[in-house]
Image: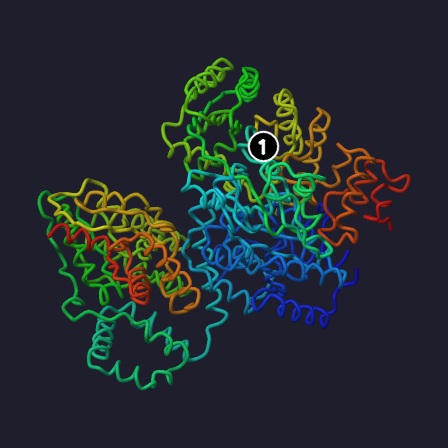
Amino acid sequence: MPALTEARKKSLRREMEALLGPGAVLSDPDELMVYESDGLTLFRALADFVVFPLTAEHVAALVRLAQREGLPFVARGAGTGLSGGCLPAEGGLVISLMRMNRVLEVDYDNQLAVVEPGLVNLHLSWAVGARGFYYAPDPSSQQACTIGGNIANNSGGPHTLKYGVTTNHVLGLEVVLPDGEIVWLGGKTRDPQGYDLTGIFVGSEGTFGIATKIVLRILRQPQAVRTVLAVFNEIDQASEAVSAIIARGLIPAAMEMIDQLTIQAVEDAFGCGYPRDAAAALLIEMDGLAAGMDEQAARVIAACRETGAREVRLARDEAERQLLWKGRKSAFGAYGRISPAYLVMDGVIPRTRLPYVLRRVNEIVAGYGLRVGNVFHAGDGNLHPNILYDPRKPGEEQRVVAAGGEILKVCAEVGGSISGEHGIGLEKRDYMPLIFSEADLGCMARVKRAFNPTGLCNPGKIFPSRKGCAEAGFASRPHPIEEAGLAQRF
Amino acid sequence: MAHGTALEPPQGAGGPTARVPAPWEMGPLALHGHDVDGVNRCVHCGLCLASCPTFSLLGTEMDSPRGRIVLIKSLAEGRIELSDSTRAHLDLCLGCRACETVCPSGVPYGQLIEAARAEIERRHPGGPVRRLFRWLNFAVLLPHPRLLGLAATGLRCYQVSGLQRVLRASGLLRLLPGPLAAWEPLLPRLPPAAARAPLPEVTHAEGQRRARVGLLTGCIQQVAFGTQNRATARVLARNGAEVLAPRAQSCCGALHAHAGEDGLARDLARRTIEAFEAAGVDQVIANTSGCGAHMKSYGMLLASDPAWRARAARFAARVRDVSEFLCQEPLRGPLQPVARTVTYHDPCHVIHGQKIRKEPRALLAQIPGLRVVELSEADWCCGSAGTYNLTQPEMAQRLQERKIAHIRATGAEAVVTANPGCIIQIAQGLQATGAPTRVMHIVELLDEAYR
């Protein structure tokens, strides 16, 4: 696509300002630069415009304008994503939804809330908290990330283990389709008929359109909560404890592992009470009815002790519980204390392979002369190795990317997946062939074409680049993605 | 690929965008002599975004901490020039440092924005009127208590003689150059001379002496809020502190540092340190949030000055906010009951600049009969932010309105806080809505309980 001429840019800017009002269109180079990355700084891409709609009609008009001009467009929330998913990979429009951030309606009797996509995840729980409700999916970035971004990535969080991921909490969506049409997928009822298009949309990483209203389930706050910190001298013991707890039929709400490097970073950050000399700690939370809760906690504590925990501690009060969680949820950011940059991986593996895979992760990263911190959803087998590097040192970026790739290969080899909750985005698209066959990808490509026939809605994401296809050995004949018209060979 | 963007994982030095020179080729990041290497602590996680008042209201990332760090870093690296829009976004920062409280990587954001402001001042000193005005303010009035006292006398005459009323009614004020016309209505009404008079150099401790402390009486604080200083001295003395208010002290330089006058800020820091060292005090007490937070950072401010580095760090370690000092021991009785419902607003440079959250609440809990209701978004800036309400009136007003709405929702009879700037801003906002709610400094409430 040819670059926009200055004259064209000016006239488009005027047109969008007329539509959205003053102060809602950015095109100054310094301002666009601020939007060139999300939470993953490895990738950068500049938009031609960043625009701030207030309504679904605004979004629809912007999308129609983009289609008319052949301009790519992509939705952006808080920009806390970790796969480059909201970057304007091929320029065009970034449609920021941060000014559409209201809670539109709360129906406590039917336990649902209707919200706009720019609402900060945690702010929904704040809004309904006074009445004893909350929104369950709790990505670690929940204090900043938005519901719209959670929808795009089908985000998880520590409490995924018991409560499921975002898609399990979405009842319906008002969506601006890539051609500008406004439709409802699902609604306020629990068992809609017809295709489960809500299910298809959630996790589509912004390639099927832009959600403008979202109907979410809200849950009653649990009657009782117990939070246990188990401290181990060896990582393997912590891994075994995870399996032992599940084997006893216990289903904690969350079961998080934090290794030594990470503990040291979060202790520097907030002094949360994790022992600095521990090889690993498990943060385990149980919630539900008060009856039987103490017994459950006792069984979890016993399982940890039997697998070698040197210390097991029950959070005394809500303040201590909050502090432990603050440490866990701030872990990624806390790496800034020990490294100027990190690349976080998001592999998923069968829980039973935890000890093996963690050993391999450490070996691989050490082999590249880098350091790794692990903090992850152990109960789900959703790993987050954070490879620390310094972009100022020549060659480190390439080494960190290579190490990350090897880790994902190990995840695939043991029967796992390359992403649990961060999305494929730009970062992992070339690893898709590790877990999907040509036919699998072809099927996905056809679904994408049904929603997004011109490909202008968030291009360059999820599907392997030409280079990725060639590496996977898909290049010898027309690739299903090419047949679907989503990529072409040059 | 269109628009010169690059998306492949990086293949060569310098990262994916070719127009950025490799950072390691550029030497240390610096702005106007300040080391801004703290920008490299930012890993771009974005957890700060929702804590930032300007980002929450505008939704634009250039007006978020993370976005401003990108701008500052790019300025320091020479990747961008200082354009009007970049300057506007940096100017719009409140400097409230709420982002520092939530930042897991410990980015020293306050220092970065100060360094950037110094750089902006250096590159854009403005026209002669602005320069004259700033010189008068920062170099003449603030550092010289006697001149400031004279100016205050003049201002008080202007306010009580009826001249202010006449001029305001006549519309002649509109003839003042640009900002002065907008600022005139915001000038605080000064108290009579007795309240502005300097504190006694020594206020003796009552009962057993627990410490010998110095009180920063401040520049504007002393002329506009001398009563708060007197209340502070009385409450400290009641709690066993011998309170020294050295005459040699002047302005601590916080306003200078926040406004990009870093050279003067360092001079004033040295003078402040000398004054309190000469007085031989154990601790230095501040009852204004910006001054307390700033004096606690003297170690950083003078880190590049070998003759002063250690002295400044020693001094900084002795600085206490008044509530921090009073909380070291239970309040000495007897305290009279104060039958009132109050709420507490956290001044930014107390809660974010000095991380003091529990102490003021613990003090209020010791006053018999007092009912304290929590204020929603108590830790959000009220829009005062030093001179922000003068330089950015529109954003300041939006924050003021939000704060006032929360205060009114509590139903409290009084708002207690711990900083004069917040008191002016909140009182003005309450007055505009006709609410009868009082606003007071926490030491004034304690002083009342001691009567």
On the question of residue B427 being in view, the answer is yes
Q: Residues within 10 Å of mark 1 (few under 14, many from 20)?
A: some
Which quadrant would residue B419 be assigned to in this image?
A: bottom left
Q: In the visual, does A112 lie left or right of A398?
A: left
Percent x, y for residue A445? 79, 43
Percent x, y for residue A222? 45, 31
- Tell me the element at label 1: loop
Between residues B435 and B161, which one lies in front from this camera angle? B435
Image point (51%, 24%), residue name: A252
Q: How many callouts does the rendering have?
A: 1
Between residues B49 and B328, which one lies in front from this camera angle? B49
Name the residue at the left extreme.
B207
Percent x, y for residue B189? 24, 71
On the question of residue A398 being in view, the answer is no
Name the residue at the right extreme.
A477
Please determine whether, in this image, residue B124 is positioned above or below residue B232: below
Between residues A305 and A192, which one lies in front from this camera angle? A192
Image point (26%, 65%), residue name: B219
Please determine whether, in this image, residue A162 is positioned above or below residue B34: above
Work out which quarter of the rendered image holds the N terminus of chain A and state it.
bottom right
Between residues A93 and A346, which one lies in front from this camera angle? A93
Name the residue at the top extreme.
A306
The residue at which mark 1 appears reads as: A164
Tag 1: amino acid: Gly
Percent x, y for residue A156? 58, 36
Instruction: Report the colour scheme.
Output: rainbow
Q: Chain of mark 1?
A: A
Image point (48%, 66%), residue name: B120
